[in-house]
């Protein structure tokens, strides 16, 4: 069956604030870890802090996909993190976030 | 052998097994022995369509027709990209839920035994892994699912970005009137691994010919080509007609258009090739 009751839209910093308290998907360029948090950049370059991100995934590669809940406009609480390798094109992903959330929402959200 | 299996549950058992050629997989062979290829009224199959779960859930149906339509084109083969959840390995099949950010859909792969290719492919698929799925869209007991013929783990994650951009690109080119879309698809970084799909049928530009209505040029060409093959004189020749003979008769149409119409008629089962790829005859003969 096709269950579309819980979408997790792909976002950058501008779109993040539309989904306060809701689950989203984004890719973070990891800068460093601080305690249990991962600090990095969103697809449009804005800073983000990811809480409860598994350290071993953050350490694996430069880019990490985070599926989690928006807690603030610079903060995400992670639920699932996936290593996205070292060769991920952030600017194209950022364009995708814009295209999927604004002009072509009917295909995604 | 097939007469025993009526419609309904039996049809989906056989149709989904991966044992049947894809033409029969729509289930029509079982549900209607008389009407044959009557389900399409001249519209073309969408080829392989990149989709999201959301788009699949919004697919429409026409009355009296079991096919699903997205953006006006019939869906048959689909490709999806997403994360694997709830993988369930059983004796005859392996299934999982595919989460592609827009929603979740069940994906099923029939397994022909523990030494089969499908078994090995599905062994490497794990929960929380990103995969590229190619398969057929099906309904079973009123629920939509995908019967996969390929499930491949993704290694270059730019493919994820690519898939969604391709979905948007195809969607826009289908929904914009006039055919050719002016969408600028952003160029991907040079580390992109070549995806295995991308075989969707692009929308054709309407033919600029004064005698032919802009919207129906392709259908008109198909109709005329078909009627040429249906003429009694054509039916009498054992090897049928050569493409050149048809082209000569189709004044105002290019060779490429005639060739395309012939290919369409072959796919639909109205004509078949005889002594070589350039000779065809009506299946009514």
Image (spheres, helix red, strand yellow):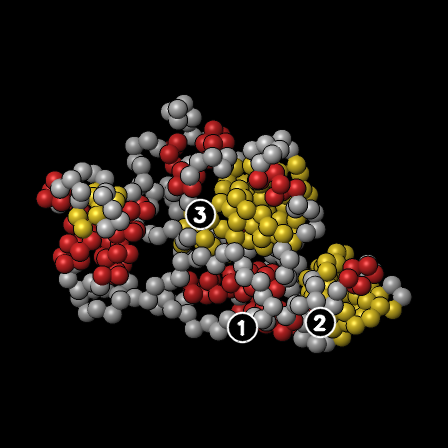
Q: Residue furthest left?
A: B233
Q: State whether discs 2 and 3 lie on one chain.
A: no
Q: Which residue is at a point 38% across and 69% down the rendered structure image?
A: B180
Instruction: Count the labels in the image.
Output: 3
Q: Residue furthest bottom?
A: A45
User: Percent x, y for residue B174?
Assistant: 42, 62
User: Percent x, y for residue A64?
Assistant: 73, 64
Looking at the rendered structure, which numbered label has been put on residue B187? 1
Q: Badge 3, how many Cα within 10 Å: few under 14, some, many 20+? A: many
Mark 1 vs mark 3, foreground winner is: 1
Q: Which residue is at a point 58% across and 40% down the rendered structure image?
A: B118
Q: Is residue A4 left or right of residue B24?
A: right
C-alpha distance separating marks 1 and 2:
20 Å
User: Percent x, y for residue B101?
Assistant: 63, 57
Q: Is residue B9 left or right of residue B106?
A: left
Q: What subunit carries mark 3?
A: B
């Amino acid at each position: 069956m096709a269950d579309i009751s819980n979408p997790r839209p792909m976002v950058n910093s501008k779109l993040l604030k539309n989904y306060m308290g809701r689950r989203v998907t984004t890719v973070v360029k990891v800068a460093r870890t601080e305690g249990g948090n991962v600090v990095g950049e969103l697809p449009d370059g804005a800073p983000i802090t990811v809480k409860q991100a598994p350290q071993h995934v953050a350490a694996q590669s430069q880019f990490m996909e985070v599926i989690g809940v928006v807690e603030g406009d610079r903060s995400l609480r992670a639920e699932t993190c996936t290593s996205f390798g070292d060769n991920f094109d952030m600017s194209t992903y950022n364009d995708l976030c814009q295209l999927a959330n604004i002009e072509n929402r009917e295909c995604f959200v | 052998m097939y007469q025993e299996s009526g419609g309904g549950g039996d049809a989906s058992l056989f149709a989904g097994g991966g044992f049947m050629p894809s033409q029969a997989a729509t289930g029509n062979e079982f549900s209607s022995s008389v009407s044959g290829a009557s389900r399409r009224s001249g519209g073309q199959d969408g080829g392989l369509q990149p989709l999201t779960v959301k788009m699949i859930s919004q697919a429409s149906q026409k009355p009296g027709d079991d096919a699903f339509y997205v953006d006006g084109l019939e869906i048959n083969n689909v490709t999806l990209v997403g994360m694997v959840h709830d993988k369930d390995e059983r004796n005859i099949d392996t299934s999982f839920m595919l989460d592609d950010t827009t929603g979740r859909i069940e994906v099923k792969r029939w397994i022909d035994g523990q030494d089969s290719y499908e078994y090995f492919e599905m062994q490497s698929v794990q929960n929380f892994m990103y995969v590229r799925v190619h398969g057929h869209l099906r309904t079973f007991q009123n629920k939509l699912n995908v019967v996969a013929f390929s499930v491949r783990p993704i290694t270059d994650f730019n493919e994820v970005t690519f898939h969604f951009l391709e979905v948007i690109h195809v969607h826009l080119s289908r929904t914009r009137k006039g055919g050719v879309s002016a969408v600028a698809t952003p160029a991907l970084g040079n580390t992109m691994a070549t995806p295995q799909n991308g075989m969707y049928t692009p929308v054709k530009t309407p033919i600029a010919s004064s005698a032919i209505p802009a919207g129906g040029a392709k259908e008109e060409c198909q109709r005329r080509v078909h009627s040429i093959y249906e003429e009694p004189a054509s039916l009498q020749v054992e090897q049928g007609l050569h493409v050149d003979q048809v082209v000569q008769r189709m004044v105002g149409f290019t060779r490429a258009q005639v060739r395309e119409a012939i290919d369409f008629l072959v796919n639909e089962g109205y004509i078949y090739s005889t002594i070589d790829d350039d000779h065809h005859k009506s299946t009514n003969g």
